[in-house]
Structure formats: structure tokens, C-alpha cells
Image (cartoon, grey):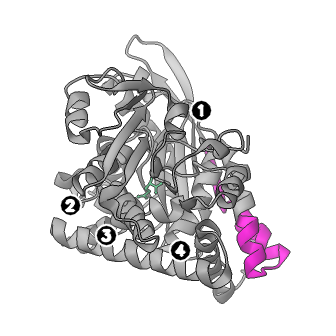
């Protein structure tokens, strides 16, 4: 199966060939500007010491400070973080926000750590990457396995070292600490707008579609809820424990409440059949939202996908091999850098509010997000139609093209 980095590099290659960029520029865009690898020593609650690996990669800084999440996941490594950082560069350029791309990660399973251990890992990792982050340099945010509490700890650690409070160093913070209204649900809301744009374009009424969501977490959980509230029928969802299916529809809000009250997985929820994560991807639905990890749609299962629309809540869920198979079968894939860009869009709004110390209402945030998602979708779909490209290649061409332009206009130093 193609790895995240192989996928990101192949996608870049397609955009480079459509844009006709020369080999030198191609190489520059394929290479991360900075990669920092750090040791994160953790004192466990029982007194023993463990040394974890941490990373922060700044892929490109041509259009502004680096931006991107931090992931806590046992299988994260430098290559994965490089791929994720590259996708952030194209994503920010595509939606026209003034950032380059970055990503960070710590190879750890946060579920096996106590809250105190998690706090120590976060603060030590934040201190180790402190030389390269900052509101004008590189602004982290949540990703898989991290949340607003993680961001609060990073903001606090950075601020203590600086000697004053710097809210703009991270986004996705709690609203009480300079976070933005609407940030928590922003990625999910954006996924819904992207899905609706694709459905509208195909002449499909969203109130008649059946949806399956892989990954009932921060992104997938609220995406399922928003889609359900807007009139879609969400028939299946899953998490690390497995999936559940009810052809008559699920109630995502009730399911979220069930998890908040202590259930570890959606599996076993009353009135549902159990399915595996891979079975979920092949269910007879109209819209599939992969909202977990990379590479879940690959050469081995893409032909079995029955959905007509794949809306990528996750980063990199579809490998280039799977993309080809889906495209040949006429499946519309709304690519990650477009479909899940609502998160970084509202991160940008949060950073702007922090820098101005002036905060917006939730309606204002949501209205701006909707406008940005719809105009970005329209731009991608127009280019795709004009040039006969898939939505993925069109989105990449716009993102990569803007970064290449910025680089050329700035010129190469020295
Ligand atoms: N982790 C999210 C993403 O992959 C959000 C990044 C951000 O807000 O900076 O887009």
C-alpha cells in the first residue's frame, strides 16, 4: 500500500506536470524546509522514565508562517509528519489563507497515559519545539489524539518561557483562553459544506442521502451530527473499536452523549448491528466520509466502495491507486485539502482575533467559514471542469500553483 509520503509526493507530481513546473522547483516543493526531531523524556506516574520521539516539520514558508496540527499517535513518524505538513501547505494556499504548512507529532498512544502524564509529555514536547514555533513563525493546532486542553498546555508553556501570555502561538484553544467561537466544530461544519456543494453540483438533494462516517472522533462525530441535523440519514459510524450500522438511521447526538457518559466505543450501541471498520467503507450508502487516518481507501478496497461521493474528513485517506479506481468508476472524491479545510480556516480566524485581541460572534465565524468553503469549492470545481481534472488534481494545482508563484515572486536567496 502507498504510504502517506508516497501519496503526497505522487499528488504533487501530478500538479507539477499540469502546471508545467521545472524539475528544480518540483524538488524544492517536495522537500520540507525544516524538520526537527526531538526526544521527549516522560516520567511516568510510577516513577519510571520513557523516552518518546517527537517531530515538527515546516514544509514551506513562502506564503507566511507555518501552520498545522500536532498529532499524538503510536504509529506517527517523520515520514508521516512530512506528508501531513506538505498537505497543510497546499491546503492553506488553496483556501487563500496566508500560511505555509507544518505538522507535528509525538509517537505515543495518549489513551495509555494518565492526564498528568499527558500534560508532562505536552509541556516537554512544547519546550523542545519552542525555538521554531511562535505566532509569527509556526502556529500549531489540534490533530489526531490532541485537543483544546493540549493547546492550552502548549500556550501556557510557551507563555511561561516568554514571560508574558502569548495566545496567538496555537489555535484550537479553549474559548476562555483566546480560542475562537466555532473552532471546535469547524472541520466538521466544513466537511458538511463541502459535501453539500458536491451534492448540489450533481443535482442530488442532501435530504435523500445515506451517509457512513469512518472515525466518530473530533471531526467525524460532529460531521455526522451536523449532516443528520441538516436532514441526511447517517446509517453507519465507527471508531477504533469498530462500527455500527442501522439502515433506518442513527442519532449522532445521542451517540455522542453515550460516549461522553463513559462508553469507550460506539460498538454495542442499542438498536444497531456491528460492522468492522473495513465493512463500513463498503456499505451501500451515497456519501462516505473517511474521517480517521491515512490510506484507508487503497488499491485493495477502492473497487468495493459503493458510495457515489467520498468526502475526505481525514488527511490522506485515499491513496493515489485508489483515486484512479474511484475516478474510473465515476465516484466523486472531494479531496482532503478542500473538504477538511474548515479547521485551519477557523484556526486562521482564531489567530487573527488573537492578534487583534478582538473577538467575533459564533454566527460571524460560521458565516465566514461557509463563504470560504463554498468559494473554494467553486474554484476547484471550475478548474476541474475547464481542464478535465479530478477535484483532487484541481485542488492540488491551485494550491501548488500559488506556492510556486509566491516562491518565484520572492526569488531565491542568495
Ligand atoms: N489538524 C487540522 C488539519 O489537518 C487543523 C490544522 C490547523 O488548524 O492548523 O487541517
Task: Judge: label 4 CB < 8 Å from ligand 1.
Answer: no
Q: Secondary structure at mark 3?
A: helix
Q: Mark number for residue 75?
A: 1
> What is the residue that sits farthest to the right in this orientation?
23
Identify the residue shown where x is 24% and y is 68%. Answer: 366
Considering only vertical position in the picture, is 223 above or below 19?
above
**Gap between marks 4 and 2, in whole Å?**
23 Å
How crowded pointer 1 is (Cα within 10 Å; few <14, some 14-19, many 20+) is rated as: few
Magenta span has 36? yes
Q: Which residues are magenta?
A: 12-37
Q: Answer left or right for 245 relative to 306.
A: left
Q: Which residue is mark 3?
A: 349
Sequence-wise, the earlier of marks 4 and 2 is 4
Q: Are marks 2 and 3 in contact (CB under 8 Å)?
A: no
Identify the residue shown where x is 51% and y is 48%. Answer: 129
Q: Which residue is mark 4?
A: 93
Q: Which residue is mark 2?
A: 181
Q: Are marks 3 and 1 in contact (CB under 8 Å)?
A: no
Amino acid at each position: 500500500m502507498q504510504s502517506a509520503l508516497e501519496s503526497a509526493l505522487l499528488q504533487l507530481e501530478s500538479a507539477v506536470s499540469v502546471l508545467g513546473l521545472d524539475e528544480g522547483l518540483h524538488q524544492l516543493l517536495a522537500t520540507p524546509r525544516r524538520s526537527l526531531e526531538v526526544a521527549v523524556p516522560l516520567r511516568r506516574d510510577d516513577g519510571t522514565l520513557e523516552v518518546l520521539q517527537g517531530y515538527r516539520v515546516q514544509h514551506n514558508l513562502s506564503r507566511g508562517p507555518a501552520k498545522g496540527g500536532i498529532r499524538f499517535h503510536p504509529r506517527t513518524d517523520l515520514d508521516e509528519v512530512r506528508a501531513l505538513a506538505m498537505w497543510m501547505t497546499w491546503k492553506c494556499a488553496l483556501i487563500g489563507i496566508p500560511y505555509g504548512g507544518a505538522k507535528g507529532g509525538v509517537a505515543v498512544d495518549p489513551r495509555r497515559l494518565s492526564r498528568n502524564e499527558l500534560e508532562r509529555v505536552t509541556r516537554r514536547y512544547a519546550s523542545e519545539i519552542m525555538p521554531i514555533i511562535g505566532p509569527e513563525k509556526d502556529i500549531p493546532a489540534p490533530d489526531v489524539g490532541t485537543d483544546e486542553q493540549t493547546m492550552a498546555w502548549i500556550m501556557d508553556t510557551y507563555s511561561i518561557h516568554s514571560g508574558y501570555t502569548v495566545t496567538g502561538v496555537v489555535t484550537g484553544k479553549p474559548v476562555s483562553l483566546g480560542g475562537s467561537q466555532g473552532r471546535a466544530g469547524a472541520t466538521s461544519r466544513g466537511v458538511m459544506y463541502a459535501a453539500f456543494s458536491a451534492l448540489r453540483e450533481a443535482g442530488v438533494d442532501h435530504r435523500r442521502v445515506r451517509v457512513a462516517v469512518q472515525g466518530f472522533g473530533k471531526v467525524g462525530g460532529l460531521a455526522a451530527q451536523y449532516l443528520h441535523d441538516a436532514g441526511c440519514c447517517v446509517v453507519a459510524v465507527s471508531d477504533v473499536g469498530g462500527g455500527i450500522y442501522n439502515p433506518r438511521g442513527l442519532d449522532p447526538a445521542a451517540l455522542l452523549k453515550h460516549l461522553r457518559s463513559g462508553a469507550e466505543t460506539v460498538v454495542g450501541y442499542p438498536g444497531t448491528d456491528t460492522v468492522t471498520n473495513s465493512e463500513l467503507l463498503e456499505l451501500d450508502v451515497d456519501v462516505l466520509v473517511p474521517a480517521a487516518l491515512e490510506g484507508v481507501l487503497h488499491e485493495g478496497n477502492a473497487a468495493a466502495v459503493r458510495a457515489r461521493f467520498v468526502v475526505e474528513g481525514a488527511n490522506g485517506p485515499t491513496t493515489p491507486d485508489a483515486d484512479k479506481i474511484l475516478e474510473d468508476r465515476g465516484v466523486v472524491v472531494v479531496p482532503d485539502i478542500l473538504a477538511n479545510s474548515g479547521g485551519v480556516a477557523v484556526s486562521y480566524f482564531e489567530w487573527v482575533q488573537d492578534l487583534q485581541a478582538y473577538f467575533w460572534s459564533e454566527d460571524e465565524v460560521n458565516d465566514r467559514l461557509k463563504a470560504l468553503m463554498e468559494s473554494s469549492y467553486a474554484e476547484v470545481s471550475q478548474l476541474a471542469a475547464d481542464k478535465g481534472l479530478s477535484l483532487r488534481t484541481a485542488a492540488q494545482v491551485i494550491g501548488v500553483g500559488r506556492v510556486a508563484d509566491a516562491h518565484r515572486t520572492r526569488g531565491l536567496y542568495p
